[in-house]
Image: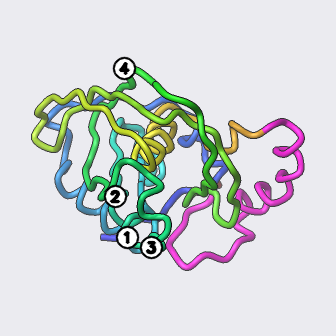
């Protein structure tokens, strides 16, 4: 089922999400719905707060990015062919490498893209859909998508990395998103 994506200004996007237990109700269905929602809105990642759930869950499919790279870009990122997986109860263990810029966007903040600096590499502790524990290190574009989604479960948004003047210049656009004055080709819900 395709779920509505909550828009910028919705309080849940600023809340720190909670860990869940294996008995979380209908978790498999929720993850399936998140994949469907993400793909129907042309995303490469989706976090539970974006569908109005305050839990530490996000899905990432960086394989799509590699499938759509131009031939001359294919060797640009070290993490090809990317990953497609769900992350539950994720916690960052370490950030490593140089920070690098990439033009990011967010389904909850449509039609705004900005260059954001993030670490080259992230090490995470998390559990998978079967609640098997993992500690894994990701780099390149996959690390970036993971860090973007991880920020969502920490109550952070990519625009928080912008300099104050840049955020001030975006205020009108952000206010329009909060008010629902935006046209997108996917289901959204706006703050009441």
Q: Is residue 86 visible?
A: yes
Look at mark 4 in the image and give the residue it sits on: 93
Specify which label sits upstream in the sequence, 3 or 4.
Answer: 3
- Look at the numbered disc 1 and give the secondary structure of its residue: helix
Look at mark 3 in the image and give the residue it sits on: 71
**Residue sitting at x 61%, y 75%:** 184
Residue contact at pointers 2 and 3, CB within 8 angstroms: no
Q: Quadrant of the C terminus?
A: bottom right
Label 2 crowding class (10 Å Cα cut-off): few <14, some 14-19, many 20+? many
**Residue sitting at x 48%, y 51%:** 50
Residue contact at pointers 2 and 1, CB within 8 angstroms: yes
Gap between marks 2 and 1, in whole Å? 9 Å
Q: Position of residue 189 (x, y in %)?
A: 56, 63
Quarter of the rendering containing residue 40: bottom left
Q: Quadrant of the N terminus?
A: bottom left
Look at mark 2 in the image and give the residue it sits on: 61
Specify which label sits upstream in the sequence, 1 or 3.
Answer: 1
Quarter of the rendering containing residue 20: top left
């Amino acid at each position: 089922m395709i779920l509505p994506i909550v828009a910028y200004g919705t309080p849940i996007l600023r809340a720190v999400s909670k860990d869940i237990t294996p008995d979380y109700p209908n978790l498999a269905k929720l993850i399936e719905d998140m994949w469907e929602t993400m793909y129907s809105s042309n995303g490469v990642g989706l976090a539970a707060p974006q569908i109005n759930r305050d839990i530490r869950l996000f899905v990432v499919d960086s394989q799509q990015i590699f499938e759509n790279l131009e031939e001359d870009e294919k060797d640009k990122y070290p993490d090809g062919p990317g990953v497609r997986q769900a992350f539950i109860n994720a916690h960052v263990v370490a950030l490593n490498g140089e920070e690098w810029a990439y033009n990011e966007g967010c389904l909850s903040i449509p039609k705004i893209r900005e260059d954001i600096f993030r670490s080259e590499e992230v090490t995470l502790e998390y559990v998978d859909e079967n609640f098997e524990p993992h500690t894994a290190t990701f780099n390149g574009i996959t690390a970036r998508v993971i860090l973007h989604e991880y920020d969502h479960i920490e109550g952070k948004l990519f625009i928080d990395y912008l300099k104050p003047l840049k955020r001030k210049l975006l205020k009108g656009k952000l206010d329009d998103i909060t008010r629902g004055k935006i046209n997108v080709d996917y289901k959204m819900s706006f703050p009441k």
